[in-house]
Image (cartoon, rainbow, N blue to C red):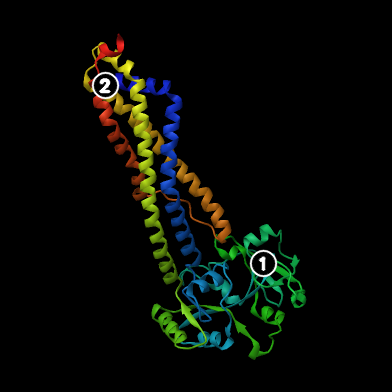
Amino acid sequence: MRLALWTALRTLRHRLGALLITVLAVALATATALVVPMVTRQVERGAQDAAQVFDLLVTAPGSGTQAVMSTLFYLDVPIGNMPHRVYQDLRQLPGTRRAVPLALGDNFAGFPIVGTTAAFFDQRLKPTLPPYFRLAQGRVFTREHDAVIGARVARDAALQVGRTFTGAHGVETGPHEDDAGHRQPYTVTGVLAPTGGPIDRAVLTSIDTVWEVHGAQAAQAQAVTAVLYSAENLAGIYTAAQRVNASKDAMAVFPGQVFAQAREALMQGQAAYAGLSVLVLGIAALTVALSVYTSSLERQRTVALLRALGAGRGAVSTLVLLETGLTVTAGVLLGLALALLASRVGGSVLGAQLGFTLAPPVLTWALASRALLLIPLGLLTAVPHAIQSSRTSPLKHLS
């Protein structure tokens, strides 16, 4: 066995060019089969982590997905506004722990300006835990045109406590015709600690400021884009949702249900991609088979010499299988490393686009087993050549 391993390594070294091509083909096939599922799982986990602090979302009637994407992740245009009385009714509902209004519609350098109240900073994952959103510097806004900015806003816009900036109308960057009412500057009073979530790229100000900017000081003109609602218990949350959905002015959305629906759609896409992955891995197996066939032609003289020196057929077969096993194993291991690297880089880029930090990629056994199947599959393709080499007469290639 030791002799066969030594001979296999020497043979592979002499075939370094072909070896590298085969290893690279297997590695690329392995990485291709794993990257998309790994990044998809990163997005799922990142989105759930970013929204886990919110129990119930109340918005204007429309698409639940759009509601979540626009008001929790700031990735879409808000559906519309609701009457202020929706927020008031929720706040006064028995069993309410917290009702936090949101008013969207303006931006600063592409970062959404979110009008809310001080209750926003009291949101918690559990009642016994400290507030989820913490100030790294400064204080919460107390007057109109005070602003608390997310960590990414502070970094990208080079803002700090005491600095001022001017907002613009709309959810996208750029001047608008009606920006005259947005020229009064905001003053940064606080900077949030990084959360890895969408709030890192948000500008938080008092909801009165948003109303004032849009000329809605009168009570009948005041409206909210959404309400983040939390009750003392789960029954209270469902009661509030039923009450909201019974009206025509608003709808209640459970972010978890939206994620579940999105996950079902992703799972269908992953099933199709899994079929494509099998095809890609099959092509890699054919590449291995071609490499085994080519190497068997180059190996004939070596095999003949081994047979002439007394090596048995078993030793010759072992040599062929060892060469193939080493080649495929090297390719699979390199592919796993490439998949982790590509997933990490892709997750960072995608997270920056989505506005929240994605969790590090995780290579589960279920995913790794797809690639590891290439090893026995590669050995299987080498079996016929191993048998053929063991039956080769030494006289034929030494004469």
Residue found at the very far top of the displayed protein? 399
Query: Is disc 2 placed on a helix, strand or loop?
Result: helix
Which residue corresponds to the image point at 45% horizontal and 30% vertical from the top-left?
20
Q: In this view, does 241 lie above or below 16?
A: below
**Image quadrant in which the C terminus is located:** top left
Of residue 304 and residue 108, the one placed in the foreground of this image is: 304
In this figure, which residue is indicated by the disc labeled 1?
Answer: 190
Q: Position of residue 230 (x, y in %)?
A: 48, 77
In this figure, which residue is indicated by the disc labeled 2?
Answer: 316
Query: Is disc 1 placed on a helix, strand or loop?
Result: strand
Of residue 321 and residue 272, the one placed in the foreground of this image is: 272
Q: Position of residue 319 (x, y in %)?
A: 30, 23
Q: Is residue 120 above or below residue 380?
A: below
Q: For label 1, count other residues whose C-alpha is less than 10 Å away and answer few (under 14), some (14-19) or many (20+).
A: many
**Image quadrant in which the N terminus is located:** top left
* 379 to the left or right of 114: left
Q: What residue type is labelled 1?
A: Gly
> Which label sits on residue 233?
none
Which mark lies nearer to you, 1 or 2?
2
Q: For label 2, count other residues whose C-alpha is less than 10 Å away and answer few (under 14), some (14-19) or many (20+).
A: many
Q: Position of residue 100 (x, y in %)?
A: 55, 78
The quadrant in which residue 257 appears is bottom left
